[in-house]
Amino acid sequence: MSVIAKKRLSFTDKVRAHLEILDPVTWISVFPPLAGGVMASGAMQPTLHDYLLLLGIFLMFGPLGTGFSQTINDYYDLELDKVNEPTRPIPSGRLTKKEAAWNSVVVAVLALAIGIALWLHIGGTRGLIIVSSITAGLFVAYIYSAPPLKLKKNILTSAPAVGFSYSFITFFSANALFSDIRPEVYWLAGLNFFMAVALIILNDFKSVKGDKEGGLKSLTVMIGTRGTFLVSFIIIDVVFLVFAWLEYQWGFYYLVVLMLGGLAMNIYLQVKLFIDPKSGVGFMESAVDDVFGNTIGQSDVSEHKAYLRFQVANNVLFLSNNLFAAGAIGMKYM
């Protein structure tokens, strides 16, 4: 039994443990697709009403929806976390499994309540898209970690599940919040889905030791570090190329130049990482440690630290173009 578990936690410490198991660092991951969906609608107005709608959908998918997925993951992965992340609330003894279960129930109910409220307020197909999206997202989050399906056991199901929950349905829901689904949003949601898949593949570097012991088939366990980098980089580069082609088709010629420039920069970083998976793009280390560390997380695994450095650059390049394109689409419909 841990030292923490042997002593009685204060109320403040217990609250902190409940917040920590919701993993606030992950909440921000849903904001870019939400912002993109809203911008592509071209219909949000600078009113208190619309700002409250935006806050509601962020709370639904962020602290509540994403938080639910993190709590359920910790609940079912106690044995793995004892190896990979022993300081997490359950393995460290700051929360019991029963307390974690109640945490997941509360945030799931609150997320559904907001979804239903938005459905009733907006009505029609748009409202149905939103409530269906959060319902599907919570369901996928549960089967991602819970037996018997436990989608996270195999990379062929785990990465798509995360991409669906974090990027695909959030983009659609944010668009539906203020307008009918724009035709271009189908493409943007799909590209965000595949980008999330590529990055989740690399995120598995941090838990490869526990994955091997627990029998989880992450890509790194199956094909090694360089193979994992290569698969992820191919997906990322195809996303950039397809995005550039779409921007050309839509007439956003200035964005094509930005997208292809971003692709060139990404390929430069990717080559460095493939050559040196542990220390590649070391010049980005200060950006992770001093600037984005609290947002994207920290790691003691060399390959995962290298991935975090790459993630900073890739996200800046992709998300900036993503938001520019969404804004240009929104302007078409204003």
Image (spheres, helix red, strand yellow):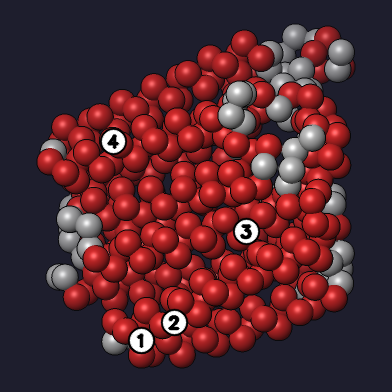
Of label 1 and label 4, which has the lower sequence position? Answer: 4
The numbered mark, 1 or 3, whose residue comes first in the sequence reads: 3
Q: Position of residue 295 (x, y in %)?
A: 61, 53
Q: CA distance from mark 4 to mark 3?
A: 27 Å
Along the horizontal axis of the image, is 128 left or right of 164?
A: left
Give how far apart the Cα atoms at labels 4 and 2 are.
32 Å
The percent coordinates of residue 197 (x first, y second) are 57, 56
- Asked whether disc 2 touches disc 1, contact meaning CB atoms under 8 Å apart, the reply is yes
Residue corresponding to mark 2: 244
Secondary structure beneath label 3: helix
Q: Vertical placement of 139 versus 124: above or below?
A: above
Q: Is residue 27 above or below residue 32?
A: above
Q: Amino acid at mark 3?
A: Leu
Whether 205 is drawn above or below 109: the answer is below
Residue 248 badge:
1
- Within 10 Å of disc 3 (Cα), the crowding (few <14, some 14-19, many 20+) is many
The quarter holding residue 198 reads bottom right
Residue type of the residue flagged with mark 1: Tyr
Residue 291's disc is none
* Amino acid type shown at disc 4: Val
Residue designated by label 3: 199
Upstream in sequence: badge 4 or badge 2: 4
**Mark 4 — residue?**
131
Q: Which of the image's four quarters has the C terminus?
A: bottom left
Dot 2: element? helix
Residue beneath the point at 84% across and 40% down:
212
Instruction: Please indicate whether residue 73 sits to the left or right of residue 4 in the image.
Output: left
Q: Position of residue 170 (x, y in %)?
A: 38, 49
